[in-house]
Image (cartoon, grey):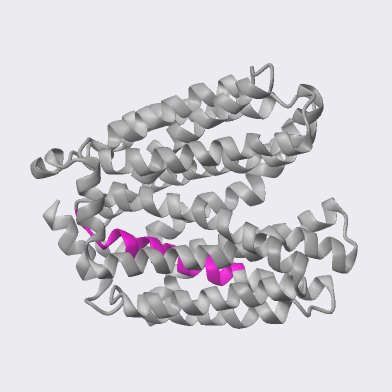
Amino acid sequence: MKLLSLLFLIMFLIGTDTFLISPLLPMLREGFHITAEASGWMVGAYAIGYAVSALISGPLSDGWNRKKVMAYGMLGFTVFTFLCGLATGFWSIFLFRALAGICAACAAPQVWATIPAIVPPQKIIKSMGIVTAGLAVSQTVGVPIGTYLAIRSWSTPFFIIAAFSLILVLLIVSFVPNIPPAAQDKKHSLLERYETLLKERKARRTFLAYFIFQTGNFAAFTFLGNWLADKFTMRVDEIGSVLVFLGLGNIIGSFYGSMAVKKIGQHASLVIGIISITILYPVISYAPSVVYVKIVYFIIFLITGTIFPVMMALLQSLSPTARGTIAALSSALMYGATTVGAYLAGLFYGHFSGFTSVCLFTAVCYLISTFLWVKSTVLTAEPLQAKIKENSNVQ
């Protein structure tokens, strides 16, 4: 439990740092005398650094000791997050945010890859849920706290995150066991790892299913605020209250969804979960009141929090020796889906029937994703826990 708590805190801190800068943009824009368009790159710098680094560091980490990669990644994250607080202009904070993203991409995939290697097979889904909750809590609690700390100075949240991150580095060194690679894994090059992983149709379809799911997910999420402001004339603080309901649903699903998964199985949980939110999204676009929106979005993210750990566990089950590669590729696909989903949602929202068309697009993405999950055979090839147990024995 101590180790899971540590992994939870790592994802909480990385998640908080990921989303923290968005509410700080007005202060940074004024302080650095830059345009609103340019300020967006302070968010993009972290995402670009993370996505590019993950594609490289993930496969390489499969040939290294995961504990060391996690510790050094968090140490770099500590240093560059601290330097963000000392930034004196746009280019300095752009550089430090990109470097922080690069280091986060070294540490975070090791969290997902470590769980199947050290946790008993019957507790994989529950453990994935606990770690996933770290990200959910970071959005619900971490970002508002960081925003409050920024009242005195925009630098303060970065210094606080860096201080706690340094503590986590020490805890990693103390509590995370060494997870060395198998001898044969040290010989594979970066490209060989991707080629070995993606040569199977099952893996390609599974990753595509995950990408399409996240594309629909982020398409609807990106334009939620715009829709609430347009339809219900809500202020920023009122929109924030809706996001709290999303976060609470996600947290509860992440922590307790494993009980439902244990009862009905991974296959049924994933398929029923995606179909359920496929139905709910088109319905929510016709919401008659904000209360209705809060309730339905709470349910949507309760379900999402339940099925996301199942997705991560299924992805990790694809290969016993490429868990870092899998975690890194899934992270890169998520950032790619964020970009594609936001772009397409903007086209639908601006040129068609507003949020209704965005929700329909999300529903179509979910249906295609469900089809690909089933066609990939990752759900039916063999019981997930048995597969993970076999993979653990291989390592």
57 displayed left or right of 51: left
Q: Where residue 50 appears, x then y in whole percent?
A: 47, 40
As drawn, the residue found furthest toward the right would be 233
Q: Where residue 250 appears, x then y in whole percent?
A: 58, 62
Residue positioned 33% across, 38% down in the render: 57
Q: From where the camera sits, is residue 334 visible?
A: yes
Residue positioned 72% across, 77% down in the render: 284
Q: Where residue 119 appears, x then y in whole percent?
A: 28, 54
18 displayed left or right of 202: right
Q: Where residue 211 appears, x then y in whole percent?
A: 46, 63
**In the displayed structure, would residue 125 be above or below residue 40?**
below
Tell which of 23 and 157 is nearer to you: 23
Residue positioned 78% across, 33% down in the render: 35
Majority SS type along the magenta span: helix
Range drawn in magenta = 301-320
> Based on the displayed image, in which of its 4 quarters is residue 391 positioned?
bottom left
As drawn, the residue found furthest toward the left would be 183
Tell which of 60 and 304 is nearer to you: 60
**In the displayed structure, would residue 349 be above or below residue 85?**
below
> Based on the displayed image, in which of its 4 quarters is residue 21 positioned?
top right
Q: Does residue 388 show up magenta in the picture?
A: no
Q: From where the camera sits, is residue 253 visible?
A: no
Q: Does residue 316 show up magenta in the picture?
A: yes
143 displayed left or right of 216: right
Tell which of 339 and 107 is nearer to you: 339
Tell which of 83 and 141 is nearer to you: 83
Q: How many marks?
A: 0
Residue positioned 63% across, 22% down in the render: 91
90 displayed left or right of 59: right
